[in-house]
Amino acid sequence: MTPPQRQRRSPQDGSPPRPAKGGRGGNPERLYVVAGADGERADIDLVTLIVARSPDPPPSATPEQAALLRLCVAPLSVAELSAYLNLPFSAVTVLITEMLTAELVQAHAPIVRQALPDRSLLEAVMHGLQRL
């Protein structure tokens, strides 16, 4: 059995193909417009939880801020917001910083484990389970 032969296609009018409008490569200044001119960022990381104070966006909110407020009715991490909004982490942190200063959202730091559990307690539990 012989493999199928591939035929090269050539443009019919001789002009190079145009890139599709929209998508990630469609508008290079879009992230600058979303992030704003100053680009200040709060000290948040990927697992910081963001919660909206009110699900209704104010009339002055940008479309990205309105979408972020609607998503943050329940706590979401910055990584999840970045994925849902299809924006890079840096642009989302600038949006969240603006919304934190306007008191539209609250940021909750992730729970950090301060100390390991006591080894003697774990051994006592293990021995108790072994006796069962």
Image: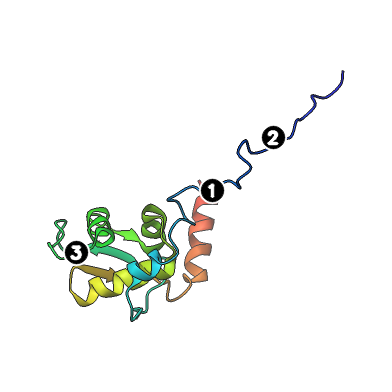
**On the rendered structure, is 99 left or right of 41?**
left
Task: Give the Cα separation between the discs numbered 1 and 3.
Answer: 34 Å
Which label is found at residue 9? 2
From mark 3 to mark 2, how far is it between C-alphas?
Answer: 47 Å
The image quarter in which residue 104 lies: bottom left
Per the image, label 3 sits on a secondary structure element best described as loop
Measure how far apart labels 1 and 2 are at the Cα level: 16 Å
Amino acid identity at mark 2:
Arg
User: Residue 72 lies in what quarter of the image?
Assistant: bottom left
Q: Please give the name of the residue rendered at 36% of the width and 58% of the height, measured from the top-left corner.
A: 81
Tag 1's secondary structure? loop
Residue at the image point whose x is 36% and y is 78% from the top:
39
| Identity of the residue furthest to the right in this view | 1
Decide which of 108, 91 is in the foreground and name it. 91
Disc 1 designates what residue?
A: 18
Q: Which residue is mark 3?
A: 61
